[in-house]
Image: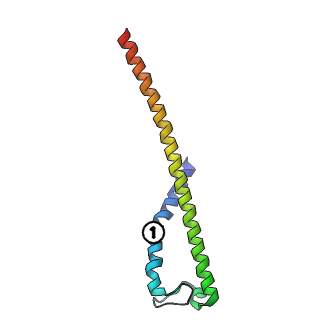
Amino acid sequence: MAAVGALFRSGLRGAMALPQRQRAWSSGSDQLGELGKGAGKGGGGGGTIREAGGAFGKREAAAEERYFKEKEREQLANLKRYHEEEISHHKKEIERLQKEIERHKSKIKKLDDD
């Protein structure tokens, strides 16, 4: 469970950063122009390959997009797995507590019968 917690914490941190990263990409496209087309108006293109533009720049931009989408899928899968494990744990805990309630009710009934 500790490993899942560590995985969750790193995944959540990454998942929390995703909306910001996506906003930066969408709002940064105004400054950078089309991905892989070379250095944009914003003063930086994200590296020498992308600054050069052309086919290599487009391929680099596409590879970067694929990388981040794959990371996002992994993080969401980890987050989903974490929540499913938490639900399972809580259901087991509910069952345990319901058994305890029944045990106490039977003790009360036994006391009433005496």
Residue 39 colored in magenta in the image: yes
Taking the image as shown, residue 65 lies to the left or right of residue 12, namely right
Q: Nearer the viewer, residue 15 or 6?
A: 15
Q: Position of residue 8 (x, y in %)?
A: 52, 55
Point out the residue furthest to the left here.
112
- Asked which secondary structure carries label 1, the reply is helix
Instruction: Give the magenta-colored segment's residue range.
Output: 36-40
Q: Position of residue 42 (x, y in %)?
A: 45, 88
Q: Nearer the viewer, residue 27 or 46?
A: 27
Q: Is residue 35 above or below residue 80?
A: below
Question: Counting other residues with Cα less than 10 Å from the Cα at mark 1, is it few (<14), some (14-19), or many (20 or more)?
Answer: few
Residue 54 colored in magenta in the image: no
Taking the image as shown, residue 1 lies to the left or right of residue 99, namely right
Q: Where is the C terminus found, in terms of image quarters?
A: top left
Q: Amino acid at mark 1?
A: Pro
Q: Position of residue 4 (x, y in %)?
A: 55, 51
Q: Is residue 15 above or below residue 36?
A: above
Please say which color scheme the image uses: rainbow
**At 62% across and 77% down in the image, what residue appears?**
63
Dominant secondary structure, magenta: loop
**At 61% across and 90% down in the image, what residue appears?**
54
**At 44% across and 27% down in the image, what residue appears?**
100
Residue 31: quadrant of the picture: bottom left
Q: Which residue is mark 1?
A: 19
